[in-house]
Image (spheres, helix red, strand yellow):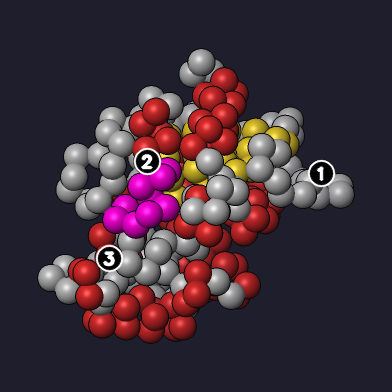
Amino acid sequence: MLSRTPEDVAAHAAAAPDLTVLDAGVADCFACPRLVTWREEVAATKRAAFRDWTYWGRPIPGFGPADAPIAILGLAPAAHGGNRTGRIFTGDRSGDVLIAAMHRAGLANQPTSVSADDGLELLHTRIFAAVRCAPPDNKPLPVERDTCAPWMRRELTLIKPTLRVVIALGGFAWAAWWPALTSVYGVKPPVPRPAFGHGARVSVPGAPDLLGCYHVSQQNTFTGRLTPAMLDDVFDSAKRLAGLA
């Protein structure tokens, strides 16, 4: 089920009956030429520290149980993280920080995420990105975000029966949520649209609560803009809203 055009993406995403089929469709997407070129170039040239790795070099499906009450929405995979390992937030410093925090919160069975076969299991939580391919400079283009959006909308639809709260990691994910809110839940965003902020919460009747969290990138964690305690607070809030605490 190769997707080579935006129309293919929309059709294949809509037709996916479950997450297994959806994940396979995501991994076979070639609809954004710039992203395809970049992800394959990175996979071929590699980083010196990972020269012995066979990079995944494809789009990254979501990860976590199908009946999750919590979703974590990221920006896009990292070039030498998910694009290398084939699993979101795996094998990079962002993943190190995120999974350690999830383990402290009881949402992951172990504190590390280094490879797709490392035994990591997420509890009550599913992670996916607004854009499924690693972008140059971590900056997807608007057209790439829009082309990829049907994958996210379908994923949200499939986990909709149990989903209670969405954590948006950064302003890009926060902005990507609003069109999905209307498409999946038939709910219009508040006017004016709420601004992103760490710890921000938006509750809209008939839809999951939305929590804002600074992205777990090095530019936030290394500078102290995002601390472990701040992450712990977000996950504590998410668990309460999901009825897990």
Q: Quadrant of residue 123?
A: top left
Camera-side mark, 3 or 1? 3
**Looking at numbered disc 2 in the image, what kind of residue is underneath it?**
Ile
Query: Mark 2 vs mark 3: which is more N-terminal?
Result: 3
**Looking at numbered disc 1 in the image, what kind of residue is underneath it?**
Pro
Query: Mark 1 vs mark 2: which is more N-terminal?
Result: 2
Q: Quadrant of the N terminus?
A: bottom left
Q: Quadrant of residue 83?
A: bottom left
Instruction: Identify the residue under disc 1.
Output: 190
Instruction: Identify the residue under disc 2.
Output: 99
Camera-side mark, 1 or 2? 2
Q: Which mark is residue 84?
A: 3
Residue extent of the magenta highlight: 90-98
Magenta stretch secondary structure, dominant:
helix
**Looking at numbered disc 3 in the image, what kind of residue is underneath it?**
Arg
Residue drawn at x 57%, y 20% as measured from the top left: 240
Q: Is residue 157 something one can see in this rendering? A: no
Q: Secondary structure at mark 1?
A: loop
Q: Residue furthest right?
A: 192
Q: Crowdedness of circle 1 by 10 Å Cα count: few (<14), some, many (20+)?
A: few
- Mark 3 and mark 1: Cα distance apart in space: 38 Å
Q: Crowdedness of circle 2 by 10 Å Cα count: few (<14), some, many (20+)?
A: many
Query: Mark 3 vs mark 1: which is more N-terminal?
Result: 3
Residue drawn at x 49%, y 37% as measured from the top left: 228
Residue 165, x across and y down, in percent: 58, 33
